[in-house]
Image: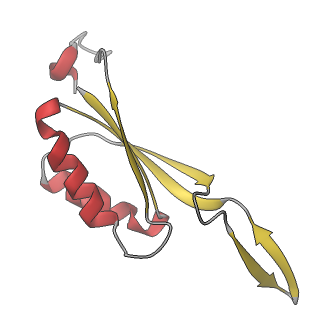
Amino acid sequence: MKLVTAVVKPFKLDDVREALSEIGVQGITVTEVKGFGRQKGHTELYRGAEYVVDFLPKVKIEVAVADSALEQVIEAITNAANTGKIGDGKIFVASLEQVIRIRTGESGEEAI
């Protein structure tokens, strides 16, 4: 089992959710986050004063998937979140040792 964490632009959230639903992903966790990558933020002009925006708003999407679905999930997220512009985001993949559904006590892939 794998935990796929994607950090994407906020306006791409619905596209990613729909793409994951189309391939059969049943559950995702979404968190509003702020951060920066290589672009290290940008400057903006507000009422004539220039200021630096260090942390840009992003959305973090977490999905637990079976190993067999990993490539399909990565492809769906990549295609849905891609704008071709800087700051599109990143996808991180980590191994999950164990997953337990609290209500039923199911564990492993059955709990996903």
Q: Is residue 94 above or below residue 45?
A: above
110 displayed left or right of 9: left
User: Which color mode does the image show?
Assistant: secondary structure
Image point 79% across, 84% down: which residue? 45
Foreground: 18 or 57? 57
Query: Residue 68 occupies which quadrant of the picture?
Result: top left
Q: Residue at x 39, y 66 (%)?
A: 12
| Snapshot quadrant of residue 93 | top left
* Quadrant of image for the N terminus: top left
Badge count: 0
Q: Is residue 44 left or right of residue 33?
A: right
Q: Is residue 89 above or below residue 53?
A: above
Q: Position of residue 46 (x, y in %)?
A: 81, 83
Question: Can residue 15 be seen at all in this image of the molecule?
Answer: no
Q: Look at the image and tell me whether residue 66 can be seen.
A: yes
**Going 19% across and 52% down the picture, which residue do you hit?**
21
Residue 66: give x, y in percent of width and height: 17, 30
69 vs 60: above or below: above
> Could you tell me which residue is drawn at 19 percent across and 40 percent down?
70
* Residue situated furthest bottom in the rendering: 48
Residue extending farthest to the front is: 38
Of the 4 image quadrants, the one containing the C terminus is top left
Among the 4 quarters of the image, the one containing residue 8 = bottom left
Residue 44: percent from the left, percent from the top? 75, 80
| In front of the other: 46 or 67 | 67
On the rendered structure, is 105 left or right of 5? left
- Residue 55, position as x, y percentages in the image: 68, 59
Name the side, left or right, on which 44 lies relative to 8. Answer: right
